[in-house]
Every structure is written in C-alpha cells, then in structure tokens.
Image (tube, coloured by chain):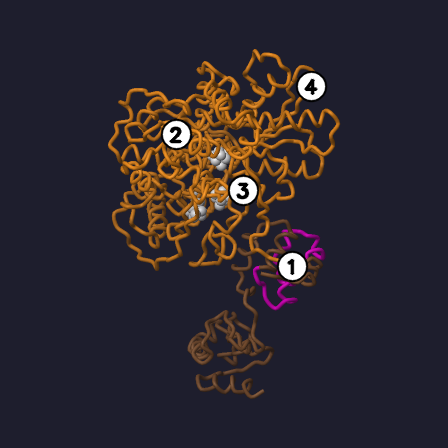
Amino acid sequence: MDTINIKIDNKNFQVAEGTTILEAAKSVGVNIPTLCYMHLHHLNTTHKPTGCRMCVVEVAGRKNLVPACATECLPGMEIKNQSIRVLNSRKTVLELILSDHPTDCLICAKNGDCDLQSMAQEMGIRHLHYQGEQSHYIKDRSPAIKRDMDKCIGCGRCLTMCNDVQTVGALSAINRGFMSVVAPAFQMNLEESVCTYCGQCVAVCPTAALTEIDHTKTVIRHLADPSKTVIVQTAPAVRVALGEEFGYDPGTIVTGKMTAALKDLGFDYVFDTDFAADLTIMEEATELLDRLTRHLNGDTTVKLPLLTSCCPGWVSFFEHHFPDMKDIPSTARSPQQMFGSIAKTYLADKLGIKRKDMIVVSIMPCLAKKYECSRDEFATDGNPDVDFVLSTRELARLIKQAGIDFKSLEHADFDKPMGESSGAAVIFGSTGGVIEAAVRTAYEVFTNQKLHKVDFEQLRGMDWIRESTIDFNGTPIKIGIAHGLGNARKLLEEIREGKSLYHAIEIMACPGGCIGGGGQPLLHGDSNILLARQKAIYAEDKGKMIRKSHENPSVKKLYEEFLGSPMSKKAHELLHTQYFDKSNPMKITKD
Amino acid sequence: MTICENNVAKIEIICKEFNYDKGELINVLHKTQTTFGYLPEEVQQIVAQNLNTSLAHVYGVVSFYSFFTMTPKGKFPINICTGTACYVRGAEKVLNEFKTLLKIKVGETTKDDKFSLSNLRCVGACGLAPVVLVGEKVYGRVTLDGVQKILDDYNES
Ligand code: SF4
Ligand code: SF4
Ligand code: SF4
Ligand code: FES
C-alpha cells in the first residue's frame, strides 16, 4: 500500500493513499466528529451524503472549509482540525441542527445512547443561540417500531439500510425544505407499508427518531401480578451481546448471569429459545428430507430449494416482494413461536395452569419478533402464544432499573424442561447457523450413520452469499446462505428465473444474522463487535455436551409424550404455519 | 381502491415508452399526470410496479416537486404567481382572498370540482404583477376586489 505524507494541526503523519481525510485521520488516531457519515465495514457500505457538515476541516490553500468525510487526502496536504474557525463552524452547524430538535433528553428513549446528545456534550453546548420553528409530526407506532420524526436530523442513514442494504424500500425522503422528512409512501404508518421490521434502520439511527416499541413497563406489571405465571425464553444471540450493556468486552458470553438476572427479576421459569430451536430443526430437517427424497425419486412437483423460515423479517419480505414463491419456504414456525405454542399447551398442562394465566415473554435480539408474536395465526381465541417480546436493549434497561448489579451475579442454569438445548441450537444466532444445525440432523437421518465431525466451517463466516456442497454419503447436497435482505433478493431472483441450483437455502434478514439484529446493543459503526459476537456463538456451541438437535433429551421426551413424530398432525397444528400474499399495499383491485 | 384495466394499460404504455427505466421516473410521472390530470395513490403503485422501484420512492419524488399533484384539478384551475415581482405587489393577499372566497387551501379543489388553487413561481409576466392564471387565461394587476370578479366570470358560465 502506498503512503503519503500529510500534516494535521502541524503534526506530520504518514497515511494510506487514496483515502478520505476522515479515514486518514482515524488511521493515525485523530478524531474528527461526524454525524451523517456511516461506515459499516462488515456490510461493505459507506453512507456519506455530506449533509451535516459536522466534519469540516481547513485545508491550506482552499478558501472554504471541506467535509473530511468526502474529501480525498492528497500528498502534502496541510489540514487543520482544531483551528478556531473549524471549531466555531462545527459549533454553529450543531446549534442549527439543535435549533429545531426537541430538548427532552432527560426522558428520551435514546438518553445515553444518542449520537446527537454525545455530540452536544463533546462540543460543550451550553446555550442554544438559535430558536427555530419546531416540527410536529404524528407519532407512528407499529407493533415493533416507533417513529418520532420530530427527532429526525435528516442524516439519511435509515434510507441506506432500508433501500440499499435491505432493498425493502419502505422509507423515502419526502417533501422538501423544512417539511422534508423520512417516511413511508403517502406518509402511511409503517404498519401499512412494506416494512419487514428488521430494525436495521433503528440500529443506525443516531437519534430517537426510530426506536423500538418498549414493553418493559407492561412486563414489570405482569411480573408483579400474583395470579400470573410469567415464563421467559431467551434467544441465542442475546447471551453473546447483553454483556456489552454492562461494560463487558464484545463477545463475552453471559448466559449464566443473564439467567440469574431473569430469576432475580421475578420470572417464574427461565427457559431457553434454544430448546425450541432444536424443535425447529426436528421439523425443518424432516421437511427437507421429505422433499429431498421425493425429488431424488423423480417427483417433479416437489418445491426445491427449501428456504428456512425462522426469521420473521425475512418472512415479511417474501410475503411482500415474492408472494409467487410463498410455497417454497419451510412451513416450520420460528423457534420463538414454537416455544410459545408448546408452552401454552404442553407446559401449561404439565404445570396445571390455565392458558390465560400464563404469560410468555421473549428476550430477542430482534424487533421483527415483536411483530411476529402479534400475527393473528399465532393466537388461540385471541390469546397470543407469545405475549411480549423485549429486545436485548430493553432487557438491559430492565436489569438496570431493578438495581441488579449484573457483574456480581452468580451463574444460574436454565429451568427444565424447556431450558435444555444443544449446540446446534446456539448457532441459530449467527448467519449460517440454522442450516449447519439442520445439516447435523439431516445427515444422520438421511444416511443412518453417525456424523463424527459436526463443525461445518465451510458454512460459517460473514461473506454475503455463501455456498457449499455437503456429501450426504454419496448424495451431494447443495446449500446456499444469504444474510441481509438485499442478498436474499439475489438468491430469490435466481429461483424465480429457474436458475437456482440449491437444495436448501438459509436466509436471515439482518446482516450477520441475529447477532446483528435490530434489537441488539448498538454497534455505533464498529464492525469488530459483530465479529466478536459471532466468535462467541461458535465457542458456546463447542462447549456444549450435546451438539445435535435430535439428541436433545427434553425434545425427544416432548415427541414421546405429546407430539408423536415430526410433521405429525399435532406437530402441524402447533409447529407449522402458512404465508400470505402482501404484495398490494394500497389494496388496489382492477376492474 | 380500484383502478380500471384500461388505465393500468395506459400507465404500462407510458412506462414502456421510457423502457421501464427507473432513472426516467420523473418523465414517466410527468407524462402520467398529463394523461390523468393528477397522480392518485393507485396510479403511483402501478408506476412503481412497472419501473420495479419502491412505492415510497415514487411518492418521495411526487411530494418533492410542487408540479406533481395528488388531487384532481378543478374544471378551472387557478394559479397565482408568487414569484418575487408578484409577491412584492401583493400576491399573497390575492392568494388569501381566493382561499377565503373558495374556502379551500392551496393544492385543494372545491367540492363542486369547479375550482382548484395552486401557486407557481414567476410566469414571466412581471410587468402585469400580480398575475393570476385561470386555465390558460392570464389576469394582470389583480386587486383584492378583482378576485370576486374573476370568479364571477366562471360562475356565470
Ligand atoms: S425495519 Fe427494516 S424494512 Fe422496516 S423501515 Fe427499517 S430498515 Fe426498512
Ligand atoms: S430517521 Fe434517524 S436515521 Fe433516518 S434520517 Fe432521521 S435521524 Fe437519520
Ligand atoms: S435475522 Fe434474527 S434478528 Fe434479524 S429479523 Fe431475522 S430473526 Fe430477527
Ligand atoms: S459527517 Fe461529513 S458531512 Fe456529515
């Protein structure tokens, strides 16, 4: 790599050639403030609309200040990052942004985690010299996401996520001038739009313009109600990220402390979504083998590839954009929903309590799961299988509010029976994990032989689209993996054109899979955090005694006592679902 | 919400003319508005589908350009110039008088579909400021009293 010499604030530096001033400065430890700029290394995505002008610097020989995020660094450049002119200009820009921004930081959902707030703090803003007109938009509450556009600073990060990375197209910049804002078509609510609730816009929004719907207060109320049995399930990706909210290094596994905290919070039973992930594999792998065997026997009506269906963001995506293919995905419900339906039947019976007296809470890395549990098909007589979903961030807040000293907690174990799980279930949390788990089980069932090497390294990693052929004892099985909905779209278009060569494809809506979910602690642009979480997921799998779903004793027992066999009538009723065509948002009929 | 097959076909023909190219969205919308007089929601959805772009994006463009409208224009569309010259010579007061008499806001159409109200930037007749257009007809040096007279011209017909 060629380097060039530059000066920043009279100090000499050597930096890589062909970078922006911002990147060059960062590489030598000089911090230039940014607000609209976003670089997500793991997504290979850079968003620089040069809209905010927080990053301006002085360059010798140039009359105007230049935005560091979009100006190339040239040999011999003399840059001033600390001059009075630069500092005053940044301060003015920030005060103008703040001039029409609500100042209710004390009671704001983003308090302590807001880029705008930190910026005001760093710049030492103590007085607002400009008082602008305030905007008053309607607050939009969907089942998963709250939009408060009065807090939007127009950075456009959400647009890059929704339109370019996810290719969902739910949001657009609309109107102009003071009235310009980010909104769905016709300013309809998110709920009526094509939004998948993947939450990737929420994950990058610098302010509280986009936040999750907060259910912590409702959950506290139910915990305090003695007539209710409140049980909780925790998704695999939560345990490798929750620690970040309490000062642990990214990638620290806090399963035992998390379980202890949930017990301290007063949940009657602390169970694991991983139990239901094993159940998902039992159903999904059986469905895959069923389709596969029929296909190999020459049945041309069989739909292949089989697509995984455990990600509700992805389910919404194909319901909106690819409804012609809604019979390809597996009909297996997500682990969260399998857990709910088993809890409110099998478990409720076992505990001798009525359905209406049981409250099922999920802790999820995900915002789409908040929406998923509200879908009509996942309720019996109006009583939902899963009552409330809290994101990883909400759980952290709940623990802090309860005054629990997380770091000093002793490890606790999950309760039985729905707390027992295999390593295969843990890896559901990362892109590639679901299909690896399915392969571990499908291989043994298909070949009738024991699988000795359970680690399928070729299915792991962060590449956008991965593919691999696995040898099922002479039968090559072709696997595809995509994470991020834009990449899913590519694989789906191949299928639509009849060009797809795969037998099975795993799709996760969020980049990285659930470890990068819309409900996780915020990355603030640091891709390394995601990689650390991924590493932790596979480490947790390695440490498990049981690493194949079909060897989970509690799952085996559930089939013996209650469900019969995978894909039995009862299993269909409780563990499978159907999909809907949602491609016509304006409900237009042609006549 | 319904749209007749015939109109769907018309939109498709326009999109085809522009090779179904999303880059031509503004031109497609322009031509579509010329055909239908306005761009209702269902028309925007058909355009989005044909150009393989998102409905939000189409709406984003429609809402950005004041030229595009989502409400049907009245039989007599009234346009008030609010360019600098007209503005200085009282265009805003004239505009307000129209609003009061017609009981509609800018961008709206009267209940009987007779009049609609919009403002536009300089029409190049600054010598006649303030200028009002009704359809193709130009009224110059419009006074507050003149507003009712203009409306009377069309109320009689
Ligand atoms: S949640 Fe996902 S689909 Fe919905 S607006 Fe945000 S990025 Fe788009
Ligand atoms: S909603 Fe958030 S991410 Fe989107 S433009 Fe506004 S401030 Fe930026
Ligand atoms: S990838 Fe995981 S976190 Fe993201 S929407 Fe899907 S299930 Fe939720
Ligand atoms: S960060 Fe450079 S212009 Fe916003």
The residue labelled by disc 4 is A475
Task: Give the answer, above or below, for where A454 lies relative to A293.
Answer: above
Q: Quadrant of the C terminus of chain B?
A: bottom right
Instruction: Give residue A316's mark.
Output: 3
Do discs 1 and 3 belong to a common subunit?
A: yes
Q: Residues within 10 Å of mark 2 (few under 14, many from 20)?
A: few
Q: Amino acid at mark 4?
A: Thr
Q: Nearer the viewer, residue A273 or A403?
A: A273
The residue labelled by disc 2 is A29
Chain letter tied to orange: A
Sequence-wise first label, 3 or 2: 2
Q: Is residue A329 magenta?
A: no
Q: Disc 3, disc 2: CB below 8 Å? A: no
Sequence-wise first label, 2 or 4: 2
Secondary structure of the residue carrying tag 2 is loop
Instruction: Give residue A590's mark.
Output: 1
Q: Is mark 3 within 8 Å of ligand 1?
A: yes
At x 26%, y 29%, the residue is A404
Q: Amino acid at mark 1?
A: Lys
Please state the chain letter of the residue tagged with numbered disc 4 in the rendered image: A
The location of residue B82, given as percent across then percent down, is: 48, 72
